Amino acid sequence: MHHFVIKALTFALAGGLLSTPLSPTPAAPKVTFTIGIQSDVDSTNPFTGIVVEAYETYALMYDYLTTSSAKDVSPQPSLAESYSEAPDKKSWTYKIRSGVKWSDGQPLTARDAAYTFNRIIDGDFEQTNYGNYVVNIDKAEATDDTTLVLHVKKPTPIMERLAVPILPEHVWKDVDGDAVKSYANEPQNGQPVVGSGPFQLVERRKGQYLRFAANKNYWRGAPKFDELVFRVFTNADAEAQALVRGEIDFAYDLQSNVFNSLKDKPGVTTRSSEYSGFNEIAFNTGAALADGTPIGDGHEALKNKQVRLAISHAIDRRTLVDRVLNGHGSPGDTFIPPVYPLLHYTPPVPQNFDLAKANQLLDAAGYPKKADGTRFALRLYARQESQDSQSTAEFVKSWLKEIGIDVTVKVMSEDTLTEVIGQGDYDMFEWGWVVEPDPDYQMSVFTCGKRSYKDGDAIYADLSDSFYCNPAYDELYEQQAGETDQAKRAELAKRMQQLVYDDAAYAITYYYNDLVAYRSDRWTGFTPQPDPDGSLLFQYGVHSYLTMAPVTATEKPQAASSSGVNGGLIGGIVAGVVVLAGAVFLVTRRRSSVSADDRE
Amino acid sequence: MRGYVLKKVGWSIGTLLFVVVFNFFLFRLLPGDPIGLYTRGRNMSPEQLIRLRQQLNRPMGEQFVEYLSNPFASAINSTRFNRPVWEIIGERVWPTVLLVGTAVLVAALAGVWLGIRSGWRRGSRFDRITTGTTNTLYAMPEFWVGMMLIMWLPFFPSGGINSVGVSGFLATSVDTLWHMVLPVTALAIVYLAEYTSIMRASLVDELRQDYLTLARAKGLREDLVRRRHAVPNALLPTMTLIFLNLGFVIGGAITVEYVFSWPGLGLLTAEALRGPDIPLLQAVFLLFSLGVIVFTLLADLLYAVLDPRVSTR
């Protein structure tokens, strides 16, 4: 037994020692940019993945017909160098860039694009992630190698925002509708995943990291570094440590306490960027099914718009930003965040914090204060998963007390809350949305048709979580859904925001920022989206990956950290020596005592 | 002896059956809409939603029969990863066995050694220091110990199993050993106290036994009295503990895996709970129960071999 252990150890140790001189030393070390992420990519198959980190990998590996500009997130040509709607509004024509190649050398043509769209249109599982983009598309057709025509059922503005990665037909035609469900789309036999984007996936270790190699022939210009690594951290504090030590270059999606702990670290820059998310206190404006049948047990008072407005006036949004977000955000008003300057509506008469006005509104609405100073009681649900949600709820409770509304705060899991909302069994809750560059999805949330629905005896939640239903709003929604002129559509979107704001379906509390930290002593040249206060990475598009570059040697301070590989090897050897020495010591001691036994 | 073995195996199979059935109904009693969970954040059309829902609305009996036909080959995909659950678990088993298995072995060897030394010389300075230290370590939460190790020992990697870009079997193995140092240490120093105190207590029980006096009367040295007579008898409770802990090895160490971003089953469980990913949780629960049942059975059987006092009739 002991001998076996010794043998194994010696072997491992010798192997470790030998492998050092044997491993070839590369002439020019690769320049690698490492990003720490807190949620592993669930799948690199674009038909399967769902987390934002997965979508980032698709954007790196593939091209899209259009992208969103870095300046103001407006649609702009990408793989399609130009596009236009047919005069009869029955089709859209995309001029595909010529000379683009897949990473295996095959040319990328309009046929690949047509294949991708038809696959989704005709597919079953393929619809899971992209179904909503193709709802209005009859079929896709490549009239020649550079022309893609998408035939539409009715005019729709989504055609400038088709966030569908164009896949290589010669690879995916071998993955049928069944196989695609579990297709990993990972490197095989050392061959990278075939793509056309600025980076190719060359290695994946689940739960640990993804490694991409730069596509030096990328049509928008080669990235200015060689490799990109996404490294998974399940622990935010460990991620922060790794950034300080230089194991990683960029820490994404930080909580504000970790963010603050990184502020004064040498070589590290923290950045709080404008983001496309908002949080709100949502009201039960009168829960009902899509057909109008009332459901749930929401409080009668909240059906009155004046009461909801009063509550909105009783929320001190500035304090929430300062105290809940530690200043990393801005007070909220309408449901398309200002990060989309072309679409965001700034109300001329904001619902300011004004308790006197709130009291007046409630008096006028017919809810006078009783002898004990209260008017009525409401429930407010906060989310277990979010400390911010619970803090906000406590603040709101204290302000509503001032205007005579007695609030009971209850904390529940997001899953439970989803269920409760769907059934209409609530008065108010705290939650939020992240708004995509195309506002259609977010706008649909407030339509009558997105209220809960019945299937058999069970009631299921749809998107609506305020049960807002306003025919004027629905009409605008239908109108914008067919409006292909971006400027006119933006006008409609603003009017819709105004309606929801004035009717106070939500009291939007704040727009929160995206908190990141990175090694500014090593990296420079990021492109924020939108300019100048937006996100540096995890954008709509791959702008930063193409402009960022290592800080050049002359301006670079002496790098302190050694490469992880060598550190690992040396460390392993040291550990091996220690273990071996210990084992030798134990065994020799044992030998001496054995001989003592024998003498006895 | 054969009867004893059959009885123990029978009990284990019974327990397993209960777990299998319980596992099915437990997850169907959970509130929530699994399709809603699956489709959250996906750009899915309403028709597709309805079709998915129909699959789940089949009668409970029908679903149960299908489940029973082979609970381990469940074709159900994880909602989070969209792949068969057992395939995902298969990838995560080895990191956990490596991490927790090594930690249990290290802790058991060191703990038994410390326990013997301090028990044999009960009340000595060595005993007081060992008992005090291990109890203090035992009282510390694993995740906190892990965080402290990361901060104090910056020479070691802050997480993961492998460095990016290491290739070749030997280099990878050494690299993995290097990554294991901190998490194994964190787990082992917390486990240590269990083995030390059990070993110490059972050795102290043996100290005044007549057979030890007899051994001394035969003229054996103290060393031999301890090693040949006292320790083998005192080892039994510790063996039980080791086997029970080995059963939990498969369950992983959720907190330590979380701190060190170690992609094992513990971390998988934590990820599955966010969501929640019900098919995956169901499979993971089944596997954990199975681990405990199998190792408890092994401990029972081994006991009969090691300790003649256990009745095998």
Image: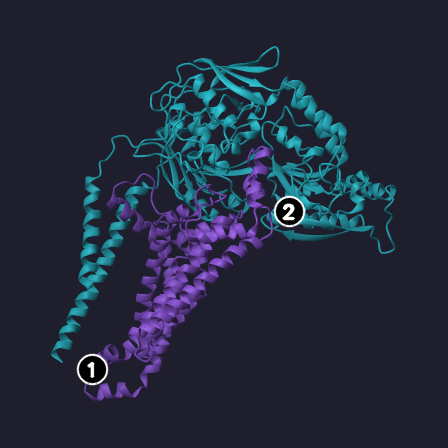
Chain colours: A cyan, B purple
Residue A189 picture location, percent across and down:
30, 34
Residue B129 visible in the displayed image? no
Q: Residue A417 or A595: which is nearer the viewer?
A: A417
- Asked if residue A262 can be seen in this view, the reply is yes
Number of callouts: 2
In this image, B196 relative to A164: left or right? Answer: left
What type is the residue that disc 1 sits on?
Arg
Q: Which mark is residue B221?
A: 1
Looking at the rendered image, the quarter that the C terminus of chain A falls into is: bottom left
Question: Local crowd at mark 1 within 10 Å, few (<14), some, or many (≥20)?
Answer: few
Element on which disc 1 rests: loop
Are the residues under marks 1 and 2 on the same chain? Answer: no
Q: Position of residue A81 (x, y in %)?
A: 49, 15
Taking depth in this image into account, of B163 and A93 the one nearest to the observer is A93
Residue B101: x and y, percent? 34, 58
Q: Which residue is mark 2?
A: A419
Image x and y of residue B40, in percent? 57, 40
Element under disc 2: helix
The correct choice, above or below, for A95 with respect to B243 in the image is above
Q: Name the foreground residue: A320 vs A363.
A: A363
The reply to whether discs 1 and 2 touch (Cβ–Cβ < 8 Å) is: no
Q: CA distance from mark 1 to mark 2?
A: 73 Å
Label 1 chain ID: B
Q: Which mark is residue A55?
A: none
Q: Residue B55 sits in which quadrant?
A: top right
Q: Residue, x 41% and y 59% (percent of image)? A: B290
